[in-house]
Amino acid sequence: MREALDSLAASLAARRCTRADAAEGRKLLAEGRATLRSGRVEALIDADMRFHIWICGVAGNPLLSEAMRLYWNHLRRAMGEVLRDPAAQKRVWEEHEEVLRAIASRDPAVASRRATEHARQAAQTMAKAMSAPSAKALRGIIPLRPVREAKSRGR
């Protein structure tokens, strides 16, 4: 499901992305990279979610935004385990940069492909992390919290 939603959102966002949207995306990317340096897993989850919600906002489809918001709230616990790994943390933001570059370049095909690759990589990493013994001990520690909006788009 995530591959389909991420791919569609990135493709639509690439068709509609303005300079202001791209600037906002670059700001979120910079904030995410700064959060990497903090090493705080919950802050990384929030930054990751804000980036993906931003893509949905730029895509301009309120149903897509709502579906992703609900989906992301259910992923928080699994993401907490995945983002404990510094290598995974770095890779996530490198992939986000590739998605952003394609969206800002207004290339729907590349944006869709990059988003699909990112979702597949995330699914593989999550499956591996959730089968690790430490994941069983941590389930339920990262609380579910509502997703905060990146910035109201007014579209």
Image (cartoon, rainbow, N blue to C red):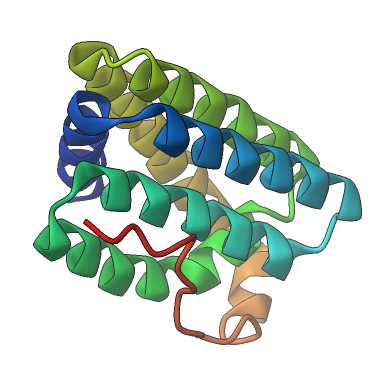
Vertical side of 152 occupied by 89: above or below: above
x and y percent of residue 37 in the render? Answer: 88, 46
Quarter of the figure with the C terminus: bottom left
| Residue positioned 50% across, 85% down in the render | 144
Decide if residue 34 is in sight here.
yes
Vertical side of 147 occupied by 96: above or below: above
x and y percent of residue 147 in the render? Answer: 45, 74
In the depicted view, which residue is nearer to us: 150 or 1? Answer: 150
| Residue positioned 45% across, 41% down in the render | 122
Relative side of 131 to 12, left or right: right
x and y percent of residue 49 in the render? Answer: 49, 59
Location of residue 87 by image quarter: top right
x and y percent of residue 9 in the render? Answer: 22, 41
| Residue positioned 60% across, 45% down in the render | 28
Decide if residue 131 is in sight here.
no
| Residue positioned 15% across, 57% down in the render | 64
Q: How many marks?
A: 0
Relative side of 30 to 120, left or right: right
Relative side of 104 to 51, left or right: left
